[in-house]
Image (spheres, rainbow, N blue to C red):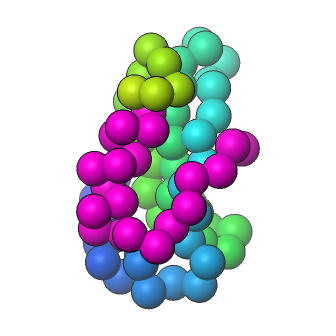
Amino acid sequence: MEVNLLAASKKPNPRFEVYQDAANEWRWRLISSSDIIANSGEGYASKGNAQRAIDSVKRVVPGAPIMDA
């Protein structure tokens, strides 16, 4: 999934959600309003690993909080 994260940071109320999928892997998605702007594209073994992946994305979208889905 290709996304312009700088443009995403200008959308209203962007936030990250962290969740477990059906395979019990941890994933994240970046949401603004009700639109999914970006997602992890891969599963992580732990919630901490998913949150570390978000940290690298947050350097581009610094204002989006991390929330449980």
Q: Residue at x 45, y 38 (%)?
A: 51
Percent coordinates x, y for residue 24 in the rendering: 61, 14
Image quadrant assignment for residue 36: bottom right
Q: Residue at x 45, y 15 (%)?
A: 45
Percent coordinates x, y for residue 12 in the rendering: 59, 84
Q: Nearer the viewer, residue 45 or 36?
A: 45
Percent coordinates x, y for residue 10 in the rendering: 44, 86
**The C terminus lies in which quarter of the figure?**
top right
Q: Report if residue 30 is visible in the image.
A: yes
Tell me: residue 20, above or below residue 10.
above
Q: Report if residue 43 is visible in the image.
A: no
Tell me: residue 68, above or below residue 22.
below
- Judge whether residue 56 is colored magenta: yes
Tell me: residue 66, above or below residue 69.
below
Q: Residue at x 45, y 48 (%)?
A: 39
Determine whether, in the image, residue 5 is placed left or right of residue 15. left
- Judge whether residue 27 is colored magenta: no
Q: Which residues are magenta?
A: 50-69
